[in-house]
Image (cartoon, coloured by chain):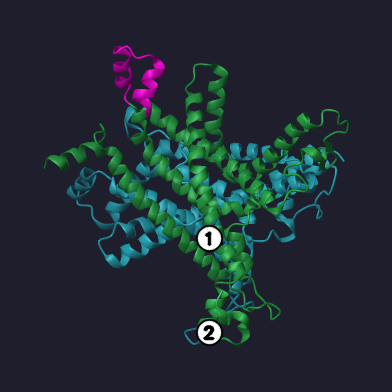
Chain colours: A green, B cyan
């Protein structure tokens, strides 16, 4: 990075650290913070969409759909989320490869499961064997995002289902009295009003999502935990920057990063609650009204 | 090999009793169910002990947070913020690194002129190190719940206690504490469920599974890695955890009924299981 970094052994402490903290591997470490934020940015809306779908399915009149929705929303209550993470990453991968296998190699006669192996024809492999490294990495990341979205979608479905039931029944009846059809009442009355009831649950979910991001490490993505352990481990003299075991300091850095992210989210979500409470028939809304007239 | 033989060999494998070698190939369903069930012993051990010890620390922390004295309130607020604001996964890694850095020979310290040597090697083992992290973590989450409940104890109750001439500890033990528990219990049930779920993280953070003595998820991922087939071991873990969750709900529901027994039927608080406090 800097011009004086060519021979690190001769540098004094401040300059040594300046060089050490800007080495190529450290830039990768800083970029992995972006990976975490990217995961949060993609997963949150996708999970919300999944959750909305699950909540609507759980209210459906059509029995199989309702059972599916209720099953989806309640499964996360009984089973640890990490079990789902470990399960879906392999299961989704195999499901995609199996589907491609059915489409691309219809005349393949060998069984797919041979003893302890899962074998599909080479054309159905995901990603293809000759694909460049970045395709492998983004495929792994995409699988991780989908896994997160499925699991957190179930949590979100839980919250949204509760919020839909919390909207006063009289509102829907009034809409019916005005001649709105059921789907109109759902779109125009129920959905706009449910967010304030869902907000405490959803903000809690956001906090949980933030705190679940280190699990990316278990899914095989090179995230901040991976880099912190990699960079912090003891480096002997054969490395350019030898140092003892510094993993504790790197992990402390991660701890501070997460505490900061939590604090920031708390502040933003607090403001959002105030914004959404305007004109609502809730305690918070009434308090705002009182403050405005006083 | 019959299933009965497998149960004999592997039912207590996770605590080191029975067959030393894990099955290597041609896994039967019986082997998977037995070994994963054997791992569940560790999940129950971590969950139950952390919850039990955490309960008392949480009560203390909640009282400290409710105190007027800054010197008591601030440390408790920071403790809760640090443990609730950061991922449990990072806490495990950090604690492990911390315990590893302690000198291997033990710490010598002098107390009243005599020298003591405290062994520290056991802290790096999962049974102690991970238990300490889980204990502190659940204490922080429960303290937040108890603190909220403590603030919603009706002031009329406290005035009535004053009128009866109660004060200090007897007022706390007879009036405030039971009411606090009653109000906090539904949320605390959630905390208990998700604490048991969180115990599955232990062997995926740094803590090594010494001699392959691991928890339920450790064995499940062992099978999934060996067979490359996630569709058998993970549903088995899921089944075990659903049973465990139902047991916890039954147990906590019984306590809930006892805490609410003086109230009329329709004023009793029902337990509602919501994902409110997972890590």
For mark 2, what is the residue?
A13
Q: Using the rendered view, name the quadrant where residue B105 is placed.
A: bottom right
* Placement of the N terminus of chain A among the 4 image quadrants: bottom right
Q: Which residues are magenta?
A: A168-191
Q: Distance of mark 1 from mark 2, alpha carbons?
A: 30 Å
Q: Main secondary structure of the magenta part?
A: helix
* Placement of the C terminus of chain A among the 4 image quadrants: top left
Quick check: can you spot residue A90?
A: yes
**Label 1, residues with CA under 10 Å away: few <14, some 14-19, many ≥20:** many
Quick check: can you spot residue B56?
A: no
Residue A142 belongs to magenta span: no
For mark 1, what is the residue?
B91
Q: Position of residue A91 (x, y in %)?
A: 69, 39
Q: Using the rendered view, name the quadrant where residue A248 is placed.
A: bottom right
Asked if A106 appears above or below B201 in the picture, the reply is above
Q: Position of residue B99 (x, y in %)?
A: 58, 70
Q: Position of residue A95 (x, y in %)?
A: 71, 35
Residue located at (37% from left, 51% from top): A266
């Amino acid at each position: 990075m800097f011009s004086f970094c060519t021979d690190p052994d001769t540098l004094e402490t401040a300059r040594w650290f300046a060089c050490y903290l800007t080495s190529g591997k450290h830039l990768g470490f800083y970029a992995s913070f972006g990976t975490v934020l990217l995961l949060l940015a993609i997963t949150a809306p996708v999970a919300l969409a999944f959750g909305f779908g699950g909540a609507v399915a759980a209210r459906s009149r059509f029995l199989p759909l309702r059972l599916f929705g209720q099953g989806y929303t309640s499964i996360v209550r009984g089973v640890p989320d990490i079990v789902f993470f470990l399960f879906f990453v392999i299961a989704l991968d195999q499901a995609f490869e199996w589907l491609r296998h059915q489409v691309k190699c219809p005349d393949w006669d060998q069984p797919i499961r041979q003893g302890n192996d899962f074998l599909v024809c080479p054309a159905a492999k995901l990603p293809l064997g000759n694909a460049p490294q970045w395709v492998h990495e983004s495929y792994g990341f995409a699988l991780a995002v989908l896994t997160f979205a499925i699991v957190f979608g179930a949590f979100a479905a839980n919250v949204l289902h509760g919020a839909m039931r919390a909207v006063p029944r009289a509102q829907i009846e009034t809409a019916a009295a005005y001649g709105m059809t059921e789907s109109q009442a759902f779109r125009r009355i129920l959905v706009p009003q449910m967010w304030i009831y869902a907000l405490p649950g959803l903000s809690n979910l956001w906090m949980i999502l933030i705190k679940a991001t280190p699990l990316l490490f278990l899914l095989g993505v090179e995230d901040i935990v991976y880099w912190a352990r990699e960079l912090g481990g003891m480096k002997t003299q054969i490395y350019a920057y030898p140092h003892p075991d510094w993993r504790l300091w790197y992990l402390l850095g991660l701890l501070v990063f997460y505490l900061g992210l939590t604090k920031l989210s708390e502040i933003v979500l607090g403001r959002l609650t105030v914004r959404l409470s305007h004109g609502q028939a809730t305690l918070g809304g009434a308090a705002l009204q009182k403050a405005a007239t006083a | 090999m019959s299933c009965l033989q497998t149960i004999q060999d592997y039912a207590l494998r996770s605590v080191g009793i029975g067959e030393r070698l894990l099955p290597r190939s041609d896994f039967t369903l019986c082997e998977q169910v037995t070994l994963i069930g054997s791992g569940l012993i560790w999940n129950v051990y971590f969950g139950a002990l952390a919850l039990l010890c955490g309960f008392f620390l949480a009560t203390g922390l909640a009282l400290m947070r409710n105190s007027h004295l800054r010197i008591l309130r601030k440390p408790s607020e920071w403790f809760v913020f640090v443990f609730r604001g950061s991922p449990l996964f990072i806490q495990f890694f950090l604690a492990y690194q911390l315990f590893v850095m302690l000198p291997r020979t033990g710490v010598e310290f002098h107390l009243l002129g005599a020298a003591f040597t405290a062994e520290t090697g056991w802290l790096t083992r999962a049974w102690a190190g991970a238990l300490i992290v889980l204990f502190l973590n659940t204490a922080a989450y429960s303290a937040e719940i108890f603190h909220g409940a403590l603030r919603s104890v009706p002031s009329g109750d406290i005035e009535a206690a004053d009128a009866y001439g109660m004060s200090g500890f007897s007022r706390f033990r007879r009036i405030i504490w039971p009411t606090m528990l009653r109000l906090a219990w539904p949320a605390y049930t959630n905390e208990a469920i998700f604490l048991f779920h969180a115990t599955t993280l232990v062997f995926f953070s740094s803590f090594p599974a010494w001699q392959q003595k691991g928890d339920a998820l450790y064995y499940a991922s062992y099978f999934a890695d060996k067979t490359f087939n996630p569709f058998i071991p993970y549903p088995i873990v899921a089944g075990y955890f659903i049973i465990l969750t139902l047991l916890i709900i039954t147990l906590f529901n019984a306590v809930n009924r006892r805490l609410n027994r003086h109230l009329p039927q329709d004023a009793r608080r029902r337990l509602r299981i919501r994902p409110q406090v997972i890590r």
